[in-house]
Amino acid sequence: MDRFRRTRFNPHLRSLVRETHISVNDFIYPLFVRPGEGIKTEVSSMPGVYQMSLDEILKECELLQSLGIYSILLFGIPEVKDSVGSDALCDHGIIATAVRAIKRAYPTMFVVTDLCFCEYTDHGHCGILDHVHESVDNDLTLGISAQQALVHARAGVDMIAPSGMMDGIIGTLRDALDGGGYPNLPIMSYSTKFASGYYGPFRDVAESVPSFGDRSTYQMDPANRREALRESLADEAQGADILMVKPALAYLDIIRDIREASNLPLAVYNVSGEYAMLKHAGNAGLIDYNRVMMETMIGFKRAGADIIISYHAKEVAALLH
């Protein structure tokens, strides 16, 4: 009998020789905070995912820590949206308020903030609009992104994650943070973010559907593999501390390409559409949900991911326990 086949007959030996492992420490769990009190509204397209007021977010943080999850990615849904996302630029806006409250109540929680404007603008795009070309003005958006980063830093965030895919964003934020007295605040770059159809349910929970057009002028063409690698390496050169591929499931080849080209930690975002497909298939009895979920997580790690941002994180943690 082949010696590799023999390892399959003994569960303990199989565990010892397993090449890829999943740990609860691999995960960052996304949370969506909105103004109000006593609000916990489930998103119909994403069963088990909620918009929550800050008091409910704090309860959720307690639950997460009981499962061994100590890292969250925070998104804000403001009460009022405008053309430049003013709430995101305010020290008393929804994100800054939430960061301060979470860090006060749970000092050991590692709080990452999404740095973008699509949730805060009335047009749903990721920055200040260039009305002539009906897209985002890259350079003007860099300016307000630097302001937003300093708002998050002053609130006490542990890491920022710029998701808008603006050219030059990492260098701009690094300069702003260093100049503002936050040289040790890390940046997790959405360095390779595709203009993907997998984001649909996220736009329900974040209330960030573009009022016109799409984001293909500043997000990546899903067909471009070499460009994907160039984008991540450019962010590394500008000072990113962690790179990211988003979405994850349809881009395992990109994850592997970046893993082999860079020694930086690499995150993947297991996005809303990927989550929703598994959830609805599981609820319909079409798949063994837990098995497929864990197989998917192993796939991300095997492709080269160090960090997994996932709405499945609580369920994975429960299974690992």
Image: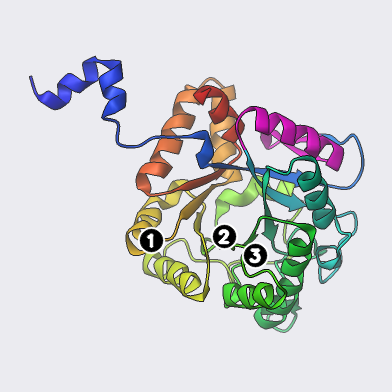
Residue 211 in the image: above or below residue 304: below
Locate residue 270, reporting x and y percent.
53, 45
- Looking at the rendered image, the disc whose residue lies closer to the viewer, 1 or 3, is 1
- The structure residue drawn at horizontal position 76% and vertical position 58%, both measured from the top left corner, is 119
- Nearer-the-camera pick, 313 or 70: 70
Callout 1 environment at 10 Å: few (<14), some (14 to 19), or many (20+)? few
Percent across and percent down for residue 195 are: 55, 61
Question: Mark 1 highlights which residue?
Answer: 263
Left or right: where 268 falls relative to 10: right
Chain part drawn in magenta: 41-69
Q: Amino acid at mark 2?
A: Met
Q: Is residue 9 visible?
A: yes
Tag 1–tag 2 contact (CB < 8 Å): no
Decide which of tag 1 and tag 3 comes sooner along the chain: 3
Could you tell me which residue is drawn at 72 percent across and 81 percent down?
140
| Distance CA(mark 1)–CA(mark 2) | 14 Å
Q: Amino acid at mark 3?
A: Asp
Tell me the number on the disc at residue 186: none
In the image, residue 263 above or below residue 247: below
Q: Secondary structure at mark 1?
A: loop
Q: Which residue has dot 2 on it?
A: 188
Percent of width and height locating residue 184: 61, 65
Circle 3 is placed at which residue position? 214
Give the residue at x 81% y 51%. 100
Mark toward the start of the polypeptide (1 vs 2)? 2
Label 3 element class: loop
Q: As displayed, is residue 113 above or below residue 285?
A: below
State the image quarter where residue 274 is shown. Answer: top right
Q: Nearer the viewer, mark 2 or mark 3?
A: 2
Say which amino acid is labelled 1: Asn
Relative placement, left or right, of 234 versus 184 is left
| Residue 47 falls inside the magenta stretch | yes
